[in-house]
């Protein structure tokens, strides 16, 4: 493609602004009436030594000021319902969920809670799970559940 000097200057300006190949292709079509394929635009830039400038990084918003630390006695007290010692608290239901061989509840140290079950085919599942326990918490849950099942 043979572009006019004005069109090439316009393409250079767009490239200096960090506009990508797709954007240059669209602007050539809409503003100059020149319809080129993506590859043709790429060759146009290469043939004329035009390089696309790096796009400016988006400005980061300043982080909000840190909240003052809670009182020492409040920080030492565990939050209500949170397991002590960093281990999940696993319980076995007295009345099993219908269709389940075994069922129970778990409270993870991170605050997630769930109701688990083992069906009649021996498959494990969650009947409800709120929060997102970490992989370490899930591994600790499996260990605690195995301990309970050995005793049951």
Image (spheres, rainbow, N blue to C red):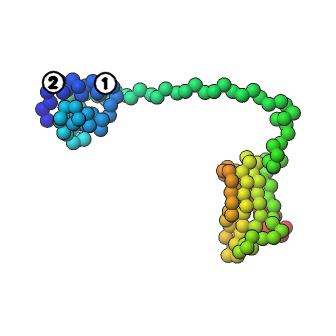
How many residues crowd mark 1 within 10 Å: few (<14), some (14–19), many (20+)? some
Q: If the image is split into quadrants, where does the C terminus sit?
A: bottom right
- Does any portion of residue 150 appear in the rendered image? no
Residue tagged 1: 16
Q: Left or right of 150: which side holds 15?
A: left
| Residue 129 vs residue 56, the one in the foreground | 129
Residue shown at 21% from the left, 23% from the top: 9
Q: CA distance from mark 2 to mark 1?
A: 16 Å
State which tag comes first along the sequence, 2 or 1: 2
Which of the 4 image quarters holds residue 47?
top left
Residue shown at 19% from the left, 39% from the top: 35
Task: Identify whether 39 is placed above or below 60.
Answer: below
Q: Are marks 2 and 1 in contact (CB under 8 Å)?
A: no
Q: Which mark is residue 134?
A: none
Q: If the image is split into quadrants, where does the N terminus sit?
A: top left
How many residues crowd mark 2 within 10 Å: few (<14), some (14–19), many (20+)? few
Q: Position of residue 33 (x, y in %)?
A: 18, 35
Task: Identify whether 47 is placed above or below 92.
Answer: above
| Residue 64 vs residue 76, the one in the foreground | 64
Which of the 4 image quarters holds residue 11?
top left
Q: Position of residue 83 (x, y in %)?
A: 81, 49
Count of numbered tags: 2
Q: Which mark is residue 5?
A: 2
| Residue 80 vs residue 11, the one in the foreground | 80
Element class at badge 1: helix
Q: Position of residue 99 (x, y in %)?
A: 71, 74
Residue shown at 66% from the left, 25% from the top: 65
Which of the 4 image quarters holds residue 150?
bottom right
Query: What residue occupies the far front of the structure in this picture?
Result: 30
Task: Identify whether 122 is placed above or below 62.
Answer: below
Element class at badge 2: helix
Q: Position of residue 51 (x, y in %)?
A: 29, 28
């Amino acid at each position: 493609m043979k572009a006019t000097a004005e069109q090439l200057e316009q393409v250079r300006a767009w490239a200096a602004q960090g506009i990508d190949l797709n954007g240059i292709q669209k602007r050539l079509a809409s503003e100059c009436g020149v319809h080129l394929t993506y590859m043709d635009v790429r060759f146009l830039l290469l043939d004329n030594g035009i390089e696309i400038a790096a796009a400016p990084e988006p400005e980061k918003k300043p982080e909000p000021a840190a909240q003052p630390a809670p009182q020492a006695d409040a920080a030492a007290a565990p939050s209500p319902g949170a397991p002590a010692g960093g281990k999940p608290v696993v319980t076995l239901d007295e009345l099993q969920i219908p269709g389940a061989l075994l069922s129970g509840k778990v409270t993870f140290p991170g605050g997630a809670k769930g109701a688990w079950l083992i069906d009649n085919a021996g498959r494990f599942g969650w009947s409800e799970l709120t929060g997102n326990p970490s992989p370490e918490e899930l591994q600790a849950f499996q260990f605690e559940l195995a301990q309970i099942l050995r005793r049951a």
